[in-house]
Amino acid sequence: MSKYDVAVIGSGPGGYVAAIRCAQLGMKTAIIEKYSTLGGTCLNVGCIPSKALLSSSHHYEEATKHFADHGIEIPGEIKVNLEKMIGRKQAVVDQTTGGIDFLMKKNNIDVYQGVGSFKDATHINIDCEKAIEIEAKHSIVATGSKPSNLPFITLDKERVITSTEALKLKEIPKHLIIIGGGVIGLELGQVYRRLGAEVTVVEYMDRIIPTMDASLSKELNKVFKKAKCKMMLSHKVESVARNGDEVVVKAKNKKGEDVEFVGDYCLVSVGRRPYTDGLNLETVGVKLTDRGQVETNEHLQTSVSNIYAIGDVIKGAMLAHKAEEEGVFVAETLAGQKPHIDYNLIPGVVYTWPEVAAVGKTEEELKAEGIAYKAGQFPFRALGRARASGDIDGFVKILADEKTDEVLGVHMIGARCADLIAEAVVAMEFRASAEDISRMSHAHPTFAEAVKEAALAATDDRALHV
């Protein structure tokens, strides 16, 4: 029987990063993955493939709608080859997951393909072609999440689909109905809207991306409406029925009236749930919360002291980079170090165009907590760099403590915001004031100047270019 210092179950961003850091710190490490490729949801059917399709569809939209403005004329009809686009997406996925294979070999991590389940606190059975049992002094559960569903919806994965199927459709929908106005639904909705599908978003709450600052929800809603997406907010879905190649979604609007939407595909995008199936956690005494999450303490230990859990399977935002931080945290804790994670400073991003990104407190949260704050906002359309590229939608908003000027939250929507948010994370990690940011030189012309200008606006309402 092979013996390890650490066994990681699940090879998504949390799991494989945890394994690498454990190996770097001198621990003999194994990783167990039930699927044939490493990388988990993120690399195989989540973050990476969706970004590939967002990029491809963005190029198509630029070519059909904006190239002429730049003096680029393409004779004839520009067509979408969806099969080739999906093929490129898969090639990106294959290259990326292959990179994880390389990293496992480089760090001398043993990889087991099969379903891992606990025999007891220190022994794991691996159900593969030939049943294997390994021994591990410590284990890390990193099994991630699966798409959630509503109890009355039958997912046939042909016409009534999840994000997994939406990433590999054989045709562009004529009318894609999306249940849920969160990150995943909006990103995939934008992909297929760009490619020519009619898109209807049906959201239970009174705004899309409801966990983010309300100003971002409002601005992104404008972007989708401008693209002629139908945004049905405050709608409660009551039934989804397939009839041949047609899907009928029935709902009640905010007035309590019955409404009906008919399309050829329905994407159910109502969040994700922790995935712990087959782990046999109950046998070893690992406790779950009433939401199905693995219960952990401040050290990410479960109720069994040598078993840890990270990522989507525990409480908190279901984000790949959050899982990565937790993977490193556990590895360094096992090595006797004293790492830290500030969950308030883990950014959230929506990869639509314009991109949406945020870190820290929203205005709604500050008001609810009774914290006095000041806000500074700067529009992208006032930037020379934004006008040069034609990306003028959006703004950067900085929230700072009214007395100390410490930055409490940064919220942005616009070009490159997925990258720009890192500046805000660094500033807040070092507890910078809005004035600190405003006094740092930002290259001109760049999109990053919007951050400086918003900081100037927050400091003393003294933005320079509005």
Image (cartoon, rainbow, N blue to C red):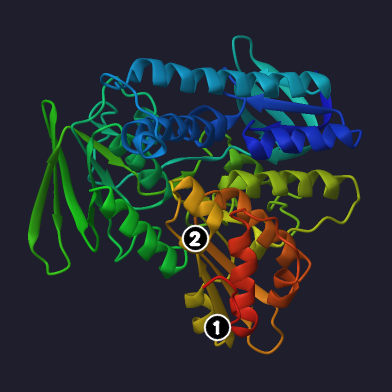
Q: Residue at x 76, y 23 (%)?
A: 104
Q: How many marks?
A: 2
Q: Position of residue 433 (x, y in %)?
A: 72, 76
Q: Which residue is mark 2?
A: 380
Residue 244 drawn above or below residue 192? above
Q: Position of residue 222 (x, y in %)?
A: 31, 59
Q: Which residue is mark 1?
A: 369
Q: Which residue is at the front of the view, 424 or 106? A: 424
- Horizontally, residue 70 falls left or right of residue 441, namely left
Residue 35 appears anywhere in the view? no
Q: Amino acid at mark 1?
A: Glu
Tell me which numbered mark, 2 or 1, is placed earlier along the sequence.
1
Under circle 1, the secondary element is: loop
Under circle 2, the secondary element is: helix
Q: Residues within 10 Å of mark 1 (few under 14, many from 20)?
A: few
Q: Amino acid at mark 2?
A: Phe
Circle nearer the viewer, 2 or 1? 2
